[in-house]
Amino acid sequence: MKKILIIDDDAQLAKHLKTYFQRYDLSLESAVHPDEGLRLLDVLEPDLVLLDVMLPDRDGFAVCREIRQKSMVPVIMLTARGDVTDRVVGLELGADDYVPKPFEPRELVARVYSILKRVGGNAQSGEVISYGALSVDTHQRTASLNEEQLQLTTMEYQLLQLFVRAPGKNFSRDEILNQLRGIEAELFTRSVDILISRLRKKLQPIDYIKTVWGAGYCFIEPRET
């Protein structure tokens, strides 16, 4: 049974979701305060975190930043504001998805399972793909640069795997969105640019990702910067 942690000051929502999630073989633990949530993150080592934006003492963005300082656990952010800016900020901080409130519990479960599936990968098709100092293990779902493991979020890893499987191919933003997210979520092309920027920073000092003006992005042979 997969372990899910929700950090949300709405205790009734957490109670309702806990019962609902059990139907889908998901164990849900909850925290109403950021400090409690971060403590449970260390204790439970959950498979995924549901994180509300509006929290007491500090917002979900600050909590997401703290989570990313010590863990690459997938994070789905929840918000009642539904602001595109919020979604952009969440992605920039390393969130994997964004669900506006109110939402249908079944939709949230679908989002959770979609991310868990991506994290789990497909062991039968595992291989190691290498380009210079970069190595991607599709079985372990890890990547390393100069023999040091990269700390990638779920979406960052998915993006990198998409690129290394098709070097030299030009991917439009829409193609990348379809490959990474399918049709399950509200999508916006700005999210691709954010993910590209984050991944580029983690691949420095080697410039693997080329911007193809008017076409999108492609993965190229390593070139020292």
Image (cartoon, rainbow, N blue to C red):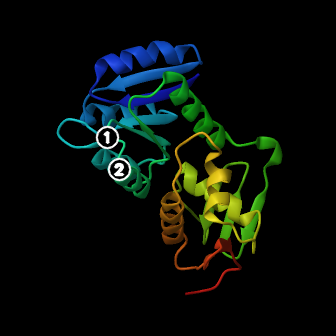
Q: Amino acid at mark 2?
A: Asp
Q: Is residue 79 left or right of residue 145?
A: left
Q: Residues within 10 Å of mark 1 (few under 14, many from 20)?
A: few
* Residue 17 % position (x, y): 44, 19
- Evaluate if marks 2 and 1 touch, with contact meaning CB atoms under 8 Å apart: yes
Give the number of marks: 2
Residue sitting at 40 percent across and 50 percent down? 87
Out of 134 and 61, give the one closest to the viewer: 61
- Disc 2 residue crowd, few under 14, some 14–19, many 20+, Cα 10 Å: some
Where does the C terminus fall, quadrant-wise? bottom right
Measured along the vertical axis of the image, is residue 102 above or below residue 20? below
User: Which badge, 2 or 1, is on the more N-terminal residue?
Assistant: 1
The residue to which callout 2 is attached is 86
Residue in the image at 48% along x and 70% along y: 201
Mark 2 → mark 1, Cα distance in angstroms: 8 Å
- Please name whichever residue, 59 or 31, is drawn nearer the observer in this view of the structure: 59
Which quarter of the rendering shows the N terminus?
A: top right
